[in-house]
Amino acid sequence: MNTTSTLSKQPSFAEAAHAFDGIARLNHLGVIQVDGEDAAKFLHGQLTHDFALLGLSEARLAAFCSAKGRMQASFVAFKRSHDQILLICSRDLLPVTLKRLSMFVLRAKAKLSDASDTFALWGLGGSAVPAALPAAPWSQMHEGDASVVRLYPADGVARALWVAPAPSPAPAGALMAEDLWNWLDVKSAVATLSQPVFEAFVPQMLNYESVGGVNFKKGCYPGQEVVARSQFRGTLKRRAYLVHSDEPLTVGQELFHSSDAEQPCGTVVQAAAHPAGGFDAIVSMQTSAALDGSLHAGSASGPMLTLLPLPYPLLDDI
């Protein structure tokens, strides 16, 4: 798909007269707390990433899948102590995720609970990110009672997740509107699953293997065979992309390609208003739809979408 002319119309980062240095309260996220000496072992057998080797100085991006390999939730996960792991996920998926995960505990010495009211979650942008936090995504450091996790940057803006007990003072920094943080989250191109796209994708359809969300060397977990087969057989026909629209985009909205007015070619996964106008979104769609022709939201005659470059490289199929 030729995006040279349309990309030049995309509102630039410099044109957005907003301060990206600051802190944003993340009310749309919740916390599942996993306690017990088997916490890491239990999660290792349920999620797409390695938890057996998880230390106190790192975090994990991970997915919880159905037996068919379809994502039911995504997490940023980290240890607050050797026997406690927090799973940060979309709040609208937390109740069903907590219920299903708890069904698999069986004899494991692990207790799961909804700790969303126990912890305060903030997004840190720009200079609000502690200088001592290692630069690699998914690094973790402790700052007093707070856990700070390095996230993928967005348009060159450093970002981090700050999690601390609810009574703790807010992190230092000017207050940033949550809508602005949501846009930065979209621009990072690392998708957070939410209810409208429950069980819609295998992890690779959201590029999770390319942003540290899947470990192909670990043991079994629900859906592992499907996820591994998609990777090793080189059959990845859907990927995550960034797009811009002059019109509003909504999660779960279907995308259409100019070559086929009847069958959708993709789905909006995460969307946010661009601070300088229009909407940006992470979409999952057929790789063939990105080659030529035009993309439209809602129908083949709907608003045209501009394909934007991803901020990270995709791993080749194995």
Image (cartoon, rainbow, N blue to C red):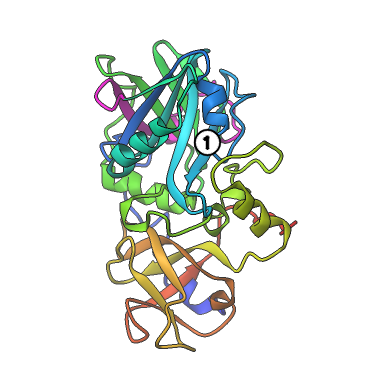
Residue 133 visible in the snapshot: no
Q: Amino acid at mark 1?
A: Gln
Q: Please say if 251 is above or below 260.
A: above
x and y percentages locating residue 88 in the rendered image: 40, 33
Answer whether residue 264 is magenta in the image: no
Quadrant in which residue 310 is drawn:
bottom right
Residue 119 visible in the snapshot: yes
Helix, strand or loop at mark 1: loop
x and y percentages locating residue 73 in the rendered image: 42, 44
In the picture, measured across the screen, residue 26 lies left or right of residue 44, that is left
| Viewport quadrant of the N terminus | bottom right
In the picture, measured across the screen, residue 129 lies left or right of residue 97, that is right
Q: Residue furthest top?
A: 144
Q: Residue furthest front?
A: 107
Picture residue at 24% right of the left edge, 14% below the top: 167
Residue, disc 1: 46
Which residue is nearer to you in this view: 74 or 34? 34
In the picture, measured across the screen, residue 138 lies left or right of residue 29, that is right
x and y percentages locating residue 188 in the rendered image: 48, 49
Picture residue at 33% right of the left edge, 68% below the top: 253
Tally of numbered discs: 1
x and y percentages locating residue 203 in the rendered image: 54, 52
| Viewport quadrant of the C terminus | bottom right
Magenta-colored span: 114-137
Picture residue at 35% right of the left edge, 54% below the top: 16
Q: Please say if 259 is above or below 25.
A: below
Quadrant in which residue 160 is drawn:
top left
